[in-house]
Image (cartoon, helix red, strand yellow):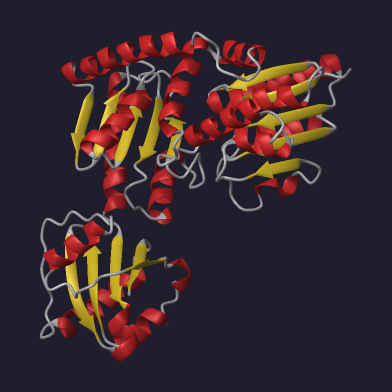
């Protein structure tokens, strides 16, 4: 029987893919290859070498993003008669157009594990496997409000403790139920995490400022430190820096940042706006960095986050707009917030704005008109739109016309503008 080659990531989501592959293709020999992304080209070479030696025809790729390495996917595609790509990472439009014979299963709103469970039609055939797939899905796409999310954190700890091969083998042998050593291992890990967090605090490995938690990672407990930063310290961004050149960025989902803001940050740091996931991405900034290299990258990250936090906002009150074509607007530029009344001519200029397609509308509701800039900021914070003005002024009806032409001109020349329509 022909051997099936499976190429995947090396994390919990890939373990879930393997469980579903094993359940679907019982009795079929398989050869697994795993990548940590730093070695994706090397693993691609190994797969092609194995294929040339064994004449494999089918390649199944699960939970591997090629948005940063399309060349490797092209090489694999050209060496196999049939390639399946099951993935949930972000890709630019038309990415797979060059691979007409590839079967692509893609949904960025589901984990690769859940995609495999559904695509292989495993759902409903094994309750234990279905439950594991849902738990892994809650972890991998970070469903914080899901009832399984707390347990999924424990499952991920257990996975990294025992390793991917032991995890998959023991779960299959136990009929897709977690083995008996799960609880004692988790209890041991909890103690290690508590000691690790105390060590982080005592040695100042965590730096907090303006909603950013910068962590100089020393061990395998980044996720646990990250959750603590978000839950206890309300961190909007948690950054993990590793001394071997890896960076992990996590964005707090409880804080509203627009797609353009996050994509701007992602592009600045990784070179691509569609790298990784929306609220989480990882990249390597340098091989074998010095301590100075790590500190420079830390500053670059903080500066980049501050930039996207200070992008323009235009706050429009649509209730007045509908009634009289006059509205109260709040403008947030850098660290300044303005409240301004525009007349109908100015509104027409906004609607005739040549870059209208780049505007993003987010519906909000305000019960009462803001009476001052600080009042406006309070409203925005209630709606989880965070601004941090150092200098707030209120532009009154008397001086609005003086500023109107200038502000409209600034709107047109600025690339990063968001429009929030209040109704």
Residue 162 in the figure: left or right of residue 219? right
Q: Quadrant of the C terminus?
A: bottom left
Q: Quadrant of residue 74?
A: top right
Residue 343 in the figure: left or right of residue 353? left
How many numbered badges does the structure rendering display? 0
* Residue 241 visible in the shown view: no
Task: Examine the rendered structure and indicate whether residue 386 appears above or below residue 186.
Answer: below
Q: Residue 368 placed where, x, y %?
A: 19, 74
Q: Residue at x 28, y 70 (%)?
A: 315
Q: Quadrant of the N terminus?
A: top right
Task: Examine the rendered structure and indicate whether residue 390 appears above or below residue 135.
Answer: below
Near-viewer residue (78 or 105): 105
Q: Residue at x 10, y 68 (%)?
A: 393
Near-viewer residue (176 or 34): 176
Q: Residue at x 32, y 79 (%)?
A: 318
Q: Residue 308 placed where, x, y %?
A: 32, 51
Residue 59 in the figure: left or right of residue 154? right
Q: Quadrant of residue 364?
A: bottom left
* Residue 44 visible in the shown view: yes
Q: Quadrant of residue 185?
A: top left
Q: Residue at x 31, y 89 (%)?
A: 323
Q: Residue 414 placed where, x, y %?
A: 34, 65
């Amino acid at each position: 029987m022909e051997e099936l080659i499976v190429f995947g990531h090396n994390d919990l989501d890939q373990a879930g893919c393997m469980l579903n592959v094993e359940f679907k293709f019982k009795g079929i020999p398989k050869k697994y290859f795993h990548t940590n992304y730093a070695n994706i080209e090397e693993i691609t070479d190994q797969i092609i070498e194995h294929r040339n030696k064994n004449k494999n025809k089918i390649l199944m790729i699960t939970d591997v993003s090629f948005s940063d390495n399309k060349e490797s996917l092209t090489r694999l595609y050209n060496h196999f008669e049939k390639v399946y790509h099951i993935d949930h990472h972000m890709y630019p439009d038309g990415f797979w157009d060059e691979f007409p014979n590839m079967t692509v299963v893609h949904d960025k709103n589901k984990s690769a594990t859940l995609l495999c469970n559904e695509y292989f039609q495993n759902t409903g055939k094994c309750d234990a496997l279905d439950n594991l797939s849902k738990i892994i899905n809650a972890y991998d796409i970070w469903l914080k409000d899901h009832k399984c999310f707390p347990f999924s954190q424990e499952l991920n700890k257990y996975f990294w403790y025992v390793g991917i091969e032991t995890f998959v083998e023991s779960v299959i042998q136990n009929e897709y139920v977690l083995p008996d050593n799960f609880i004692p291992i988790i209890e041991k890990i909890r103690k290690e995490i508590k000691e690790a967090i105390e060590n982080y605090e005592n040695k100042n490995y965590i730096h907090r400022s303006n909603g950013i938690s910068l962590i100089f990672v020393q061990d395998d407990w980044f996720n646990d430190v990250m959750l603590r930063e978000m839950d206890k310290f309300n961190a909007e961004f948690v950054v993990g820096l590793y001394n071997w050149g890896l960076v992990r960025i996590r964005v707090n989902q409880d804080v509203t940042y627009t797609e353009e803001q996050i994509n701007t940050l992602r592009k600045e740091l990784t070179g691509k706006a569609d790298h990784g996931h929306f609220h989480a991405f990882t990249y390597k900034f340098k091989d074998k960095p010095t301590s100075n290299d790590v500190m420079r990258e830390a500053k670059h990250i903080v500066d980049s986050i501050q930039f996207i936090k200070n992008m323009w906002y235009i706050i429009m009150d649509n209730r007045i707009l509908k009634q009289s074509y006059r509205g109260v607007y709040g403008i947030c530029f850098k660290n300044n917030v303005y409240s301004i009344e525009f007349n109908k001519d100015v509104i027409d200029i906004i609607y005739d704005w040549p870059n209208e397609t780049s505007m993003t509308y987010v519906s909000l509701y305000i019960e009462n008109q803001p009476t001052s800039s600080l009042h406006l900021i309070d409203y925005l914070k209630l709606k989880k739109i965070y601004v941090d003005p150092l200098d707030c002024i209120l532009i009154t009806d008397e001086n609005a016309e003086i500023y109107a032409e200038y502000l409209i001109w600034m709107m047109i020349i600025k690339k990063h503008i968001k429009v929030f329509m209040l109704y």
